[in-house]
Image: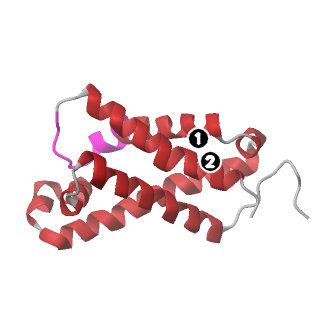
Amino acid sequence: MENSNQTSFSIKKVLLIALIASTLDGLAAVIFLAKMNFTGVFQYIASAILGKDAFSGGIKTALIGLALHYFIAFSFTLFYTFAATKITLLKRHFILPGIIYGLLVWAVMNLIIVPLTKIPHAPFHAEKAILNAVILIFCIGLPISYLTARKN
Protein backbone atom coordinates (compact mmCIF):
# COMPACT_ATOMS: atom_id res chain seq x y z
CA MET A 1 0.00 0.00 0.00
CA GLU A 2 1.27 3.47 -0.83
CA ASN A 3 2.24 5.77 2.01
CA SER A 4 0.27 9.03 1.77
CA ASN A 5 3.48 11.01 2.30
CA GLN A 6 5.17 9.55 -0.76
CA THR A 7 4.63 9.78 -4.48
CA SER A 8 4.69 6.44 -6.24
CA PHE A 9 7.62 5.97 -8.58
CA SER A 10 7.08 4.30 -11.90
CA ILE A 11 9.48 4.28 -14.84
CA LYS A 12 6.45 4.24 -17.15
CA LYS A 13 5.17 7.42 -15.49
CA VAL A 14 8.64 9.00 -15.74
CA LEU A 15 8.81 8.19 -19.46
CA LEU A 16 5.35 9.66 -20.08
CA ILE A 17 6.12 12.84 -18.14
CA ALA A 18 9.47 13.20 -19.93
CA LEU A 19 7.78 12.72 -23.30
CA ILE A 20 5.22 15.44 -22.54
CA ALA A 21 7.70 17.92 -21.04
CA SER A 22 10.38 17.46 -23.70
CA THR A 23 7.83 17.77 -26.50
CA LEU A 24 6.46 20.99 -25.00
CA ASP A 25 9.99 22.36 -24.54
CA GLY A 26 11.07 21.39 -28.06
CA LEU A 27 7.97 22.94 -29.61
CA ALA A 28 8.46 26.13 -27.62
CA ALA A 29 12.09 26.35 -28.74
CA VAL A 30 11.10 25.87 -32.37
CA ILE A 31 8.24 28.39 -32.19
CA PHE A 32 9.62 31.12 -29.93
CA LEU A 33 13.39 30.88 -30.20
CA ALA A 34 14.02 29.73 -33.75
CA LYS A 35 10.92 31.03 -35.53
CA MET A 36 9.81 27.59 -36.75
CA ASN A 37 13.29 26.29 -37.67
CA PHE A 38 13.15 22.68 -36.42
CA THR A 39 16.45 21.70 -37.99
CA GLY A 40 18.37 24.64 -36.53
CA VAL A 41 17.10 24.09 -32.98
CA PHE A 42 18.07 20.44 -32.88
CA GLN A 43 21.35 20.92 -34.75
CA TYR A 44 22.22 23.43 -32.03
CA ILE A 45 21.57 20.73 -29.43
CA ALA A 46 23.59 18.20 -31.44
CA SER A 47 26.46 20.68 -31.53
CA ALA A 48 26.93 19.91 -27.83
CA ILE A 49 28.62 16.66 -28.86
CA LEU A 50 29.44 17.28 -32.53
CA GLY A 51 30.63 20.88 -32.39
CA LYS A 52 30.23 23.21 -35.36
CA ASP A 53 29.94 20.25 -37.75
CA ALA A 54 26.40 19.68 -36.46
CA PHE A 55 25.20 22.74 -38.38
CA SER A 56 26.17 21.24 -41.72
CA GLY A 57 24.81 17.76 -41.06
CA GLY A 58 21.25 18.34 -42.24
CA ILE A 59 18.38 16.30 -40.86
CA LYS A 60 20.78 13.60 -39.60
CA THR A 61 22.34 15.88 -37.01
CA ALA A 62 18.95 17.42 -36.23
CA LEU A 63 17.69 13.94 -35.32
CA ILE A 64 20.75 13.38 -33.13
CA GLY A 65 19.92 16.65 -31.40
CA LEU A 66 16.28 15.60 -31.01
CA ALA A 67 17.35 12.34 -29.35
CA LEU A 68 19.74 14.23 -27.08
CA HIS A 69 16.97 16.69 -26.20
CA TYR A 70 14.64 13.86 -25.13
CA PHE A 71 17.44 12.21 -23.15
CA ILE A 72 18.17 15.43 -21.26
CA ALA A 73 14.48 15.98 -20.49
CA PHE A 74 14.20 12.36 -19.33
CA SER A 75 17.16 12.92 -16.99
CA PHE A 76 15.61 16.03 -15.44
CA THR A 77 12.25 14.25 -15.14
CA LEU A 78 13.85 11.23 -13.51
CA PHE A 79 15.62 13.44 -10.99
CA TYR A 80 12.46 15.35 -10.05
CA THR A 81 10.18 12.32 -9.85
CA PHE A 82 12.69 10.47 -7.69
CA ALA A 83 13.07 13.52 -5.42
CA ALA A 84 9.28 13.68 -5.11
CA THR A 85 9.29 10.21 -3.55
CA LYS A 86 11.49 11.59 -0.76
CA ILE A 87 10.29 15.19 -0.37
CA THR A 88 6.61 15.49 0.55
CA LEU A 89 6.44 19.17 -0.47
CA LEU A 90 6.98 18.19 -4.11
CA LYS A 91 3.88 16.01 -3.98
CA ARG A 92 1.58 18.40 -2.15
CA HIS A 93 2.39 21.58 -4.05
CA PHE A 94 3.35 21.80 -7.68
CA ILE A 95 3.28 25.50 -8.67
CA LEU A 96 6.15 26.93 -6.63
CA PRO A 97 8.28 23.76 -6.90
CA GLY A 98 7.61 23.74 -10.67
CA ILE A 99 8.70 27.35 -11.07
CA ILE A 100 11.79 26.79 -8.96
CA TYR A 101 12.61 23.59 -10.85
CA GLY A 102 12.28 25.36 -14.21
CA LEU A 103 14.74 28.00 -13.00
CA LEU A 104 17.04 25.31 -11.61
CA VAL A 105 17.00 23.50 -14.97
CA TRP A 106 17.85 26.81 -16.70
CA ALA A 107 20.75 27.39 -14.30
CA VAL A 108 22.13 23.86 -14.58
CA MET A 109 21.90 23.87 -18.37
CA ASN A 110 23.30 27.35 -18.95
CA LEU A 111 25.84 27.64 -16.17
CA ILE A 112 27.13 24.06 -15.93
CA ILE A 113 26.22 21.77 -18.83
CA VAL A 114 26.41 24.04 -21.90
CA PRO A 115 29.85 25.47 -20.97
CA LEU A 116 31.18 21.89 -20.74
CA THR A 117 30.00 21.00 -24.26
CA LYS A 118 31.18 21.82 -27.78
CA ILE A 119 28.34 24.31 -28.31
CA PRO A 120 29.86 27.45 -29.81
CA HIS A 121 30.11 30.24 -27.24
CA ALA A 122 27.64 33.08 -27.76
CA PRO A 123 27.41 36.41 -25.95
CA PHE A 124 24.87 36.72 -23.14
CA HIS A 125 21.54 38.34 -24.09
CA ALA A 126 19.21 39.10 -21.17
CA GLU A 127 16.02 38.93 -23.27
CA LYS A 128 16.93 35.52 -24.66
CA ALA A 129 17.91 34.25 -21.21
CA ILE A 130 14.59 35.39 -19.75
CA LEU A 131 12.66 33.79 -22.62
CA ASN A 132 14.61 30.55 -22.14
CA ALA A 133 13.87 30.61 -18.40
CA VAL A 134 10.15 31.22 -18.99
CA ILE A 135 10.02 28.37 -21.51
CA LEU A 136 11.73 26.03 -19.04
CA ILE A 137 9.34 27.05 -16.26
CA PHE A 138 6.20 26.48 -18.35
CA CYS A 139 7.37 23.55 -20.47
CA ILE A 140 9.66 21.63 -18.10
CA GLY A 141 9.26 22.71 -14.46
CA LEU A 142 5.49 23.05 -14.17
CA PRO A 143 4.51 20.03 -16.31
CA ILE A 144 7.00 17.79 -14.51
CA SER A 145 5.94 18.99 -11.07
CA TYR A 146 2.21 18.83 -11.86
CA LEU A 147 2.29 15.40 -13.48
CA THR A 148 4.56 14.02 -10.77
CA ALA A 149 2.24 15.25 -8.01
CA ARG A 150 -0.91 14.12 -9.82
CA LYS A 151 -2.38 10.83 -8.75
CA ASN A 152 -2.84 8.64 -11.80
Q: Amino acid at mark 1?
A: Gly
**Residue 73 belongs to magenta span:** no
Residue 112: quarter of image: top left
**Rendered residue at 29%/47% (across/down):** 32
Q: Disc 1 on helix, strand or loop?
A: helix
Mark 2 and mark 1 in contact (Cβ < 8 Å)? yes
Q: Which residue is mark 1?
A: 98
Q: Where in the figure is residue 105, as x and y percent of width and height?
A: 46, 41
Residue range corresponding to the magenta coloring: 110-122
- Rendering coords of residue 82 (x, y %): 66, 53
Pointer 2: what residue? 145
Question: In which quadrant of the rendered image does the N terminus lie?
Answer: bottom right
Q: Is residue 118 magenta?
A: yes
Between the residue at mark 1 and the residue at mark 2, the CA separation in whole angstroms equals 5 Å
Using a 10 Å C-alpha cutoff, classify the residue at mark 1 as few (fewer than 14 neighbours), some (14 to 19) or many (20 or more).
Answer: many
State the residue in front, 31 or 141.
Answer: 31
Which quarter of the rendering shows the C terminus? bottom right
Residue 121 rendering spot, x and y as whole percentages? 17, 39
As helix, strand or loop, the secondary structure at mark 2 comes to helix
Tell whether 112 sits left or right of 76. Answer: left
Residue at horizontal 35 percent and vertical 31 percent from the top:
130
Residue 27 - label: none
Q: Amino acid at mark 2?
A: Ser
Query: Outermost residue toward the left?
Result: 56
Residue shown at the point (36%, 51%) measured from the top left: 28
